[in-house]
Amino acid sequence: MAIDYQKIINTTFLNVVRQILTETAENGLEQPNHFYITFQTNARNVNIPDFLKQRYPDEMTIVLQHQFQNLRVDEKCFSVDLSFNGKFWNLTIPFSSLIAFADPSAQFALQFQPQNDPVPMTVPKTQQTAEVIDLNALRNGK
């Protein structure tokens, strides 16, 4: 069995983010730190308001800086209340849906291979047939 280095690195990086968010939930966020978190909005177990899913059907970046509250972190996900249009909304984001995490004030950034497959959309399959063409026949004028 081959060693899956990418999976090991991804898991380690996600644990780093989990630890950073856990410390932030326990101690608050000190200036100048702020986080940009990009995630797949269509991944399993992502729970965001419908108006955000409609606006960001594939991925979204949130910023944890001034207008957030109730940050909670567990083994598989984090949840946070963020302000959109003057109203707080709860978002629950599995770590497996993360694409990127950055703290520009610390010049720190991580990118991930999302571990969570997007929720499959039902797209009708079309019947297509393929024809194989011999390129040598075309070149020889046959």
Image (cartoon, helix red, strand yellow):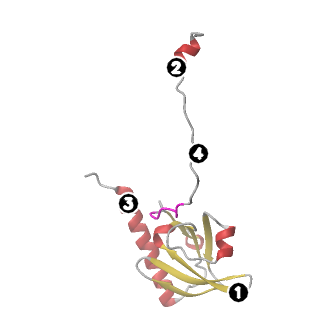
Q: Position of residue 91 (x, y in %)?
A: 58, 80
Give the mark, 3 or 4, whose residue is nearer the N terminus. 3
Q: Position of residue 54 (x, y in %)?
A: 68, 69
- Residue marked by disc 4: 126
Q: Is residue 118 magenta?
A: yes
Give the alpha-carbon distance from disc 1 to disc 3, as whole Å: 38 Å
Give the alpha-carbon distance from disc 4 to disc 1, as whole Å: 44 Å
Element type at mark 3 = helix
- Residue marked by disc 3: 7
Residue situated furthest front in the rendering: 127
Query: Is the residue marked by circle 4 packed among few (<14), some (14-19), or many (20+) residues within 10 Å?
Result: few
The image's mark for residue 47 is none
Q: Is residue 3 left or right of residue 51?
A: left
Magenta region, residue range: 115-120
Element type at mark 1 = strand
- Residue marked by disc 2: 134
* Residue occupying the point 54% across, 19% down: 135
Q: Say which of 126 and 100 sits in front.
A: 126
Q: Is residue 85 left or right of residue 130?
A: right
| Relative height, residue 90 to residue 16 (above, below) | below
Label 2 or label 1, whichever lies nearer to me, is 2
Q: Is residue 88 left or right of residue 5?
A: right
- Residue type, numbered disc 2: Asp
* Residue occupying the point 33% across, 56% down: 4
- Residue type, numbered disc 3: Lys
The image's mark for residue 87 is 1
Q: Position of residue 95 (x, y in %)?
A: 47, 72
Give the mark, 4 or 1, whose residue is nearer the N terminus. 1
Label 2 or label 4, whichever lies nearer to me, is 4
Give the mark, 2 or 4, whose residue is nearer the N terminus. 4
